[in-house]
Structures are given as C-alpha cells and as structure tokens.
Amino acid sequence: MSSGVRSSLTAGYVRRFSAAFLAALLLAACYLLFVCTRAGQATDTLAMFTLSELNRSFAPWDQVLLREWYLFILVPLIAVAVIVALVRRRFALGARMLVMVLAATVTTQFLKHFLLARPALGITYYMTNSFPSGHTTTAGAAAVALVMVAADRWREVATYLSALVLWVVALAVIVARWHRPSDVFAAICVVSVFALLLSPLELGGERGQRALRRGRIFTFLAAIIALVGVVLVAYCYYQLARGGNYFTVGTATMDLSHLAKSRHPLALSLATGTVLALGGACWIFIFEVARAGMRPRKSSSPTS
C-alpha cells in the first residue's frame, strides 16, 4: 500500500472517530439542555405541539406513515441492504451493518429505560421519558445501512433517499406527538456514533469522487440551513427561559398548548427552527457516513 493511501486512511479514521466523539457530546448536551432544564422541556413541548397543530391543516400523513412503518419502511430498507451486501459478496460489510443496526437500537433502549431519566420540572405531558426516540433510531440505522452497503455508482442515490426517509420519519414522530424534537436529535446522535465507527473507509472511483464534490456543496447548504434552525431554536429557548407573558393561562402545559393553537410568532419561529435544524442534521449525518466510500484517491508512488 502506498504512503499516500495509508495517509489518506489514517486521516479518514481520525475524522470518523472525532465525528463520533462529537456526536456523543451532542447527545449529552441535548439531554442536559432539553431534558434537565425547565426551559428546555418547555421548548421541546412547544415545538411538538406547534408542529402537530400546523399539521391539522393537512391529511394525517404522519399516522399513515407510522402505521405502515415496519411493513413499508423499516423492513424493506433492511432487506434491501442485506440483499445488496449478499449480491456484492460483501459478507463482512453486511455483518458490520447488522451490528450497527443492533447496537444503535439496543443502546437507545438502554439509555431510555435504564440510564437517562426525565426530571419533573412542571412541564407535564402524558409522555414520560422518551429520550432518545426508538423509531428515529431504527429509521436512521436502516437508512445508513443502505448507504453502507451501496456500490459506488449507487451510493449517491442511496444517500439522497436515506436522508429523505430519515427526515420524514423524524418529522412524523414529532407531528404525531410520539416524540419530542430532542428525542429525535438524540436518536440521530446515537446512530451517528455507531455508523461512523462501523462503516468502512474505502477509496471511491471517479463516479464516487464526482458525487463527493456534489455532496460537499449540499452539505454546505445543509449546514447553513441547520445553523439558521439552531439560531431560531436558541432564541425561543432564551425567551421561554425568561418566562415573560408566555405562561399566563394556567399550568405550563396549558400555556404551551395555547401558544401552539394561537400560532403565536414564538411558536411558529420554534417550529420553523426545528424543521430546518432537523433537515440539516439528517443530511449531514447521512453524508458523513456516505463520504467514507466516496473519498478521492490520492496518487503517490508505491512504497515497499
């Protein structure tokens, strides 16, 4: 193996491990900010209420999607990923993919039921601890599994499809009031850790290099979109932390429900920020895994 290739692989591993560590830090920050503080719980709940209220103007697509979740989304994605791995005779890769799906799913359930608790801070709702989201974890794991096993010429298409599926499922569980936004972001972080650690580093061909260049442009745009979303969410977090006139109707939950139903500017800003941040996060996460198989080759003289 040439020194250039070895250097490229080493840099790739450092990047992947660093990104996985960052995802773990973001998971911890999400828990501390949105689960362990009153302002965070209020922000989470208001975003969920508002997106749910806004969706009342449309067909109940979220309920339809979630009812057919296993039959038409999860099982087909996993099945296609397994079939692709078998057809390509990438048995070790298929095994790593299945380990990633299992590890992410088990970790989410362990965190939710045994390690992380949701303190009672006066923001009541019928859901207890739902952090992280199991549905989003399985959606993310299935989506990234397809990207992991895709051949070079199909990896770009798999990346677009997987990012879209993950974003739609993540929105659906929030709109349906099955999960809060922080549950969804935490689930993406969990899958990110295992996907980044277990997906292989490979040198893509010319097609993969072109896809990598296009993907970087989309990632730049996704980062801007996510940044705008984060700024909007941070502003709303700050306003709810101050209190002001937002809590005047009755209990905190009643107040948040009233803000959502009245389509208060704060609620609309928060809903917009949540959708933007979530969309940007889904693309960046999927592309970071996909780029491992689309990295450009570095020409160098071979060494012994």
Image (spheres, helix red, strand yellow):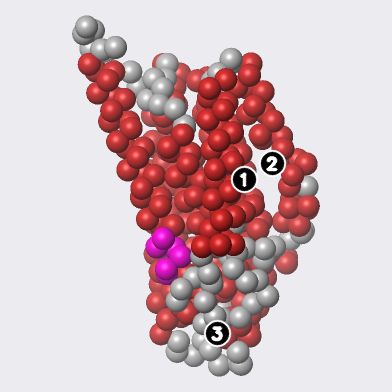
- Amino acid of disc 3: Gly
Quadrant housing the C terminus: top left
| Stretch in magenta | 28-33
Q: Is residue 31 magenta?
A: yes
- Give the residue type at disc 2: Leu
Percent of width and height locating residue 47: 56, 69
Q: Main secondary structure of the magenta part?
A: helix
The residue where tag 3 is placed is: 122
SS at mark 1 in the image: helix
Answer whether labels 1 and 2 touch (C-beta < 8 Å).
yes
CA gap, disc 1 to disc 3? 31 Å
Residue 254 painted magenta:
no
Instruction: Give the percent coordinates (x, y) of residue 113.
Output: 59, 62
Residue at 73% over, 52% down: 66
Q: Which residue bears the numbered disc 2?
A: 74
Query: Is label 3 in a helix, a strand or a loop?
Result: loop
Q: Identify the residue position indicated by label 1 in the image.
A: 139
Give me the residue at 47% from left, 51% from top.
189
Whether residue 58 is visible here, answered yes or no, is yes
Give the residue at the far front of this rendering: 114
Q: Is residue 208 left or right of residue 59?
A: left
Q: Quadrant of residue 118?
A: bottom right
The amino acid pointed to by label 1 is Ala
